[in-house]
Image (cartoon, rainbow, N blue to C red):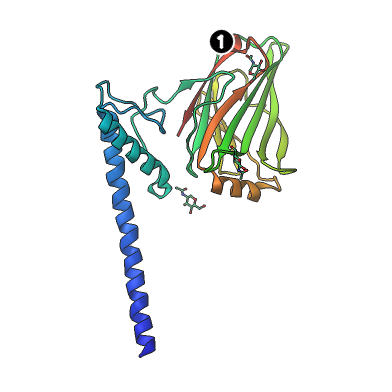
Amino acid sequence: MGKLIQLILALVVLSVSVITVAANKKHCKKRMAKLKKCFEKGYQPAIFPDCKAGSKAIKKRKTKKCAEIEAKVFENQKCGQFQCESKTNGWTPIFNTTSPRVALFNISEFKVKFTENKRTDKFLYLSVNVNIYDVEGNETGHTNLNLYATKKGDKTIFTGFKRFYIAGPLNDCSRYMTLNYLTDFNFEMTTSVSQSEMFQFTLPNGAVYTEDMMECAYFSDWKEVLKEGVEAAVKLETLIPDLEEYYSTEYMVV
Ligand SMILES: *[C@@H]1O[C@H](CO)[C@@H](O)[C@H](O)[C@H]1NC(C)=O
Ligand SMILES: *[C@@H]1O[C@H](CO)[C@@H](O)[C@H](O)[C@H]1NC(C)=O
Ligand SMILES: *[C@@H]1O[C@H](CO)[C@@H](O)[C@H](O)[C@H]1NC(C)=O
């Protein structure tokens, strides 16, 4: 008799949890659709900065409601990544600064597009970071790619370091790189924060080259940082004052 009651209880619990998962999925879809409507009606995004908002003015009361929906879509990471119409066609110019924070999902990729303006004729240096923030808004780690370029004869030689840092002592990983496949500053660099193949370079002809962090002893610790991570930002930094004369940089989060 006791066994039978246990079995019935177990079945009830199981079916309730199945229903809950299905309801959550339905909720996600509904909320995302509502948020899209909000943007169309002129709601200015607070959390998803690249989303395009309609030009009409939106009422104060509606703004509050939309902000609540946006926060819910952001908080419920189980919903998956929210896709919206982009206001910048994806790319936003960035120079020596940190981007606004965006929602971090385990599939997030942070792209930086380089466009050459002038041939390299001296030592050039740029650091590209992706900072990870926890729910309290504290930085808990970051990826870091240092990109060096120098002139050698009539060629540009690319080298650098690929790294990630975890907040706290002795938890970083750093490797020197020779980037023989780069010949000028026309390429896209992708940081895939959750992948061991963390950095990729895509050339204009579509060829992709990967710089991985496979050998890094702390990679499992890095995964823990990402589990706690809710937001991220791209940070570009240089001490070369006229770097923009040599190349422009834009970023995009996908
Ligand atoms: C996100 O990460 C979890 C756990 O690591 C994994 O099970 C899930 O498939 C990932 N989602 C995507 C969309 O990659
Ligand atoms: C996060 O930052 C706040 C200050 O902004 C600090 O008081 C708090 O201790 C930090 N939390 C952790 C876990 O380090
Ligand atoms: C970039 O910003 C840093 C401070 O964050 C500053 O020290 C440096 O001079 C700036 N570089 C350029 C090229 O403006």
From the top left corner, tell me how far across and down residue 5 is, in percent: 35, 84
Position of 1 with respect to 101 (left or right) is left
**Nearer-the-camera pick, 215 or 168:** 168
Figure quadrant of the N terminus: bottom left
From the top left corner, tell me how far across and down residue 83 is, in percent: 36, 36
- Identify which residue is drawn at 41% across, 28% down: 49
**Nearer-the-camera pick, 174 or 134:** 134
Category of crowding for the residue at label 1, using alpha-carbon neighbours closer than 10 angstroms: few (below 14), some (14–19), many (at least 20): some
Snapshot quadrant of residue 212: top right
Figure quadrant of the C terminus: top left
Position of 6 with respect to 112 (left or right) is left
From the top left corner, tell me how far across and down residue 177 is, in percent: 70, 31
Snapshot quadrant of residue 137: top right
**Nearer-the-camera pick, 221 or 109:** 221
**Nearer-the-camera pick, 114 or 234:** 234
- Identify which residue is drawn at 52% across, 43% down: 135
The amino acid pointed to by label 1 is Asn
Snapshot quadrant of residue 133: top right
From the top left corner, tell me how far across and down residue 249 is, in percent: 54, 19
Outermost residue, right side: 170
- Identify which residue is drawn at 35% across, 65% down: 17
- Identify which residue is drawn at 60% across, 44% down: 196
Q: In this picture, is 126 found above or below 36?
A: above
Count the marks.
1
Q: Which residue is mark 1?
A: 117
Determine the secondary structure under disc 1. loop
Outermost residue, bottom side: 1
